[in-house]
Amino acid sequence: MAIDIATRVGTGGARRGKRAVRLSGRDRVTIGVMAGVPLLVVGGLIWFPTIASVVLSFTNWDGIGGVTTAHWVGTENYRQIATIYPPFWPAVKHNLIWLGFLAFVATPFGLLLAYQLDKRIRGSRVYQSIFFMPVVLSFAIIGFIWQLIYSPTQGLINNLFSDPSHGPVTDWLGNPKLNLWAVLVAVCWRHAGYIMILYLAGLKALDPSLREAAAIDGAGEWHAFRTVVFPALRPINIVIIVVTVIEALRAFDIVYIINRGRNGLELLSVLVTNNIIGEASRIGYGSAIAVILIVISIIPIVVFVWSNFSEKQA
């Protein structure tokens, strides 16, 4: 009898535990507002413009007379961009150089900073603040700062390595063979601090026993980092790659501040701006370039993330 009563009580408790909790009207309104407002904001500021850009990229709309005046031209905009639009391929090349520089120079430098600061050296917090300081600045401000540094007459670099009063000096931002690399140094100054913080967070979260086991096995510092620490940072590496690709393809502010993205600083984002709000308003043309930029940015991210998740499931 006692067992039967206990069984019934247990069964009743399990049933009561599975019973769905009914939400009051106030709770439903709260959840609706908390979920609905972000969805409306994301939909209105991201998804709607994206879908509109895809549709407009197949038209010749110039922004005058309303959308109803747009005429469907199919893939003509894309054909012209790939064949008869001179700035397009240089802009693609510059974006790829931008991506390569961030991936193979700025990112390893940020990882090096994070690894050294993770050793709890004296004044580590001060160094972290110093290296992270450029991240809180906008690229527009960074552009103004480095314009002063690269100035041909009063710039810091020319004053340190040459004498303006005794001959010509290097025009770092005016020379199309140099200005892209000069801007990438400024971008690296900012990007490395961001990467440093991300990797530093990953290093702080690592299990200390991994390094201890490697030290017990007699592994050196570099060998332990290469075989133990870095593989354990795979989740952070995925984030780093996604962030780096996005940063390389969304670059706009700093080159537009320097020379409006011309004379060796052409980028896809600048071409979008010039065609949509420039002197010759070609919204359909600019939308086509924007769609190309979206596709280029999505493909490597999807491929890399998919391959990593596939490896984990296997």
Image: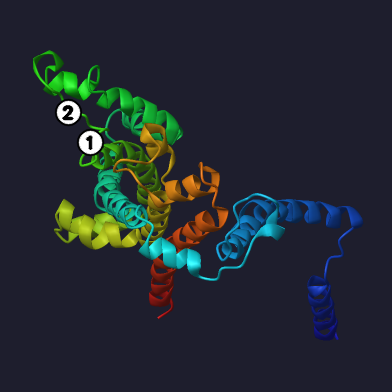
Name the residue rendered at 20%, 42% in the picture: 177
Image quadrant assignment for residue 180: top left
Q: Residue furthest left?
A: 166
**Is residue 23 shown left or right of residue 233?**
right
User: Label 2 crowding class (10 Å Cα cut-off): few <14, some 14-19, many 20+?
Assistant: some
Residue 27 falls in which quadrant of the image? bottom right
Q: Residue at x 44, y 32 (%)?
A: 140
Residue type at tag 1: Asn
Look at mark 1 in the image and give the residue it sits on.
175
Residue contact between numbered discs 2 and 1, judged by CB atoms under 8 Å: yes
How are the colours assigned in the image? rainbow
Can see residue 209?
Answer: yes
Local packing at callout 1 (Cα closer than 10 Å; few below 14, some 14-19, many 20+) is: few
Disc 2 versus disc 1: distance between alpha carbons? 8 Å
Residue 246, how many percent across, how many down? 43, 53
Please give the residue where the numbered disc 2 appears in the rendered image: 170
- Kindly state the secondary structure of the residue where label 2 is placed: loop
Q: Quadrant of the C terminus?
A: bottom left
In the image, 224 versus 290, the foreground residue is 290
Report whether 90 appears left or right of 29.
left
Residue drawn 19% across the image and 55% down it: 215
In-front residue for pair 33/285:
285
In the image, farthest residue toward the top: 165
Residue 162 placement (x, y as % from top left): 11, 21
- Image quadrant where one finds the N terminus: bottom right
* Residue in view at x 57 percent, y 60 percent: 60
In the image: residue 247, left or right of residue 27: left
Q: Which mark is residue 51?
A: none
Mark 2 or 1, nearer chain start: 2
The amino acid sitting under disc 2 is Thr
The correct choice, above or below, for 298 with respect to 143 in the image is below
Where is residue 148 shown, x and y percent of the image? 31, 22
